[in-house]
Amino acid sequence: MMHGGDRGGVDQANLYEWGGENQNGDYEFDIERPNWEKPIHQLMADTKVTVFFHAHDHVWVKQELDGVVYQEVSSPADSDYELTNWAVAYKDESSVILPNTGYTRVSVSPEQVQVDYVRTYLPEDESQEQISGEVAYSYVIEARND
């Protein structure tokens, strides 16, 4: 959860201190955060942040906005292996949405960042279709040399 009771990644990046708009779409950043130079999302985009990890929605979602990947990580200990109701909060066309349960493995080198979503299941729930340790999704972010 990026802020308050709202859920989502890039779907919420325009709001409040993240993007400066209120729920009605009015830009109020300068009023609400008068001593801040710019909203958080713009700061991340300007400084070439490649990925922002956030959690709480019990679903695994990858989204991208302005070169910044917003990565929602799942809950590895939750025995609900399906998409939760929170998945509907992710509406952006860049969304890759996968069901809970698993963990996110991140490998960093000077050339790239590799992100893998590794599924986990309780021993009594494993089957030929549900195998703990199986990589359900993987992506690479190349180093920014600009």
Image: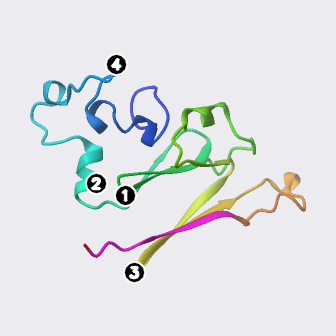
Q: CA distance from mark 1 to mark 3?
A: 16 Å
As helix, strand or loop, the secondary structure at mark 1 comes to loop
Which quadrant of the figure has residue 48? Answer: bottom left
Query: Where residue 21 sits: x, y (%)?
Result: 28, 28
Identify the residue under disc 4: 24
Say left or right for 88 vs 48: right
Mark 2–mark 1 CB contact (< 8 Å): yes
Which label's residue is closer to the chain start, 4 or 2?
A: 4
Say left or right for 128 vs 132: right
Identify the residue under disc 2: 45
Q: CA distance from mark 4 to mark 2?
A: 24 Å
Q: CA distance from mark 1 to mark 4?
A: 25 Å
Mark 3–mark 2 CB contact (< 8 Å): no
Q: CA distance from mark 2 to mark 1?
A: 7 Å
Which label's residue is closer to the chain start, 1 or 3?
A: 1
Which label's residue is closer to the chain start, 1 or 4?
A: 4
Q: CA distance from mark 3 to mark 2?
A: 19 Å
Above or below residue 83? Residue 107 is below
State the extent of the magenta-drawn residues as a range. Answer: 136-145
Q: At 55% from the left edge and 38% from the top edge, which residue is drawn?
A: 90
Which quadrant of the figure has residue 129? Answer: bottom right
Which label's residue is closer to the chain start, 4 or 3?
A: 4
Identify the residue under disc 3: 111
